[in-house]
Image (spheres, grey):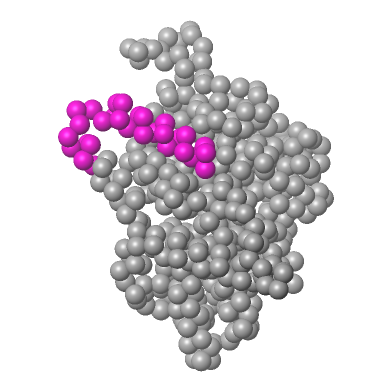
Amino acid sequence: MVTRPISSKATNGHYDAAKDAADEEKRLSEKFAVHRRLVPLVAQNEDVLFLNAASAPPSNIIVHEAITRYAAEALYELYPYGTIWQNTREEARRLVARCINAEDPSTVAFTRDTTEGLGSFIRSFKFERGDNVVILDTEHPNMVYGFLALRDAGLEVRQVPTVAEAERTGRVDAIDAETLRPYVDERTRVIGLSTISFDSGQRHDIAGICAAYRPRGIHVLADLTQHVGFAALDVQALGISAGAFSLHKGLNCPTGLGALYISPKTFAELDDPVPPIVSMAAAKNIREDLLVRGDEPVDFYPDARRFDHANMSLVAVTAAEAYTRFYLDVLGPADLEAHLYNLTSALAKESERLGIPVVGPKERGHRAPHICVLGLDPGEWGAYLKGTVGMKLTVNRLGARVSFGFYSSLEDVRKFVQVLERGISNDLSTKH
């Protein structure tokens, strides 16, 4: 991460913080305006207003060229499945590990999606009857169902109630260690939590939760899907046991590729976990002739690679290698995060002017950089917004979820505000 020096601009002997902030916002806006050209759907269509990056962004030239190169290699190379694409896979693994600041590429396994990553960790965990796990009542179904499926084996799933309080106060707050404390006891084995919530966009205090509960032997399994590629991420600093994420959101890849991170410390504590599905890619002692003796032990890789599959989506791996490099070395995680915060802050300010409530925390450290949820009635406003030609966003239980990507601009914010103003002029209520 590049750290920029504090500006030395001064007025009457004092730092002009407002001008400094305006200059930085201008720099970021100009930088990302250039990269917007890489997304033809929005760059070449003035009538398109894409506000749905948290679901899946529109594709871009970086990914398109990577897939085109993959297709060309498939046409003209004798056996690209060998050295070429296997090397690309390992380079993608290295870049993804760098993207989350993992200790080593071997701590990252490629999966089909977030679901498989979370499930692989959950199913390889040795629970005992009477153990419990703690999750939120608003956690993503991929996490919830993974644990609920083990209830018949005696696992207690404790859901922290947050919905009723949010409905009472009209505010969705980020979760910290104190929020979870009444639900954690000596039989708690895992806390499952997204670093950034998919529906409301609050950014939980994962580092504080890990600091409070990891020393007690409680593992923290994180869903990182709404974090990776949208904001700078350091899994070591957070202190999580494991984290899973899909690459088709913030990292702009085709669907069908995800990743599972397991920290080396956690791996040692799990007592040689066995993957729920064992591929030959998981075994170090696979013979060259592929014959397997029934009386020999399975010598698994001593790290996350034992969760790999032999046949993964190599076209998605190729796209991941190209886009992740672009994200790290050209966009810059810190710059992109700041740019996205500028956009959501601008939208929140305009929404406040219109009398539209913003759901979720206001503080930057407690909210997603790319998600802004407007507390509009999902019924009448949902019908109006979904019927707006050329616009794409998500209407959920909380209202209208607007989510930005690297290609988004302040002009997009202005266009969306005009859509809101038209709705209000058509007598749609701003009270939810």
In the shown orientation, is residue 222 left or right of residue 180?
A: left
Residue 114 drawn at (x, y percent): 51, 45
Residue 395 % position (x, y): 51, 70
Query: Does 373 appear above or below 271?
Result: below
Q: Residue furthest left?
A: 76
Rendered residue at 45%/65% (across/down) = 30
Query: Which x, y percent locates residue 199?
Result: 58, 62
Residue 401 in sight here: no
| Residue 107 visible, this orientation | yes
Task: Depth check: give the residue in front, 94 or 277.
Answer: 94
Q: Nearer the viewer, residue 184 or 421?
A: 421
Q: Residue at x 42, y 9 (%)?
A: 293
Is 338 part of what is drawn in magenta?
Answer: no
**Residue found at x 53% / y 62%:** 339
Image coordinates for residue 39, horizontal then vertical, percent: 35, 61
Residue 89 in the magenta stretch? The answer is: yes
Q: Which residues are magenta?
A: 71-99
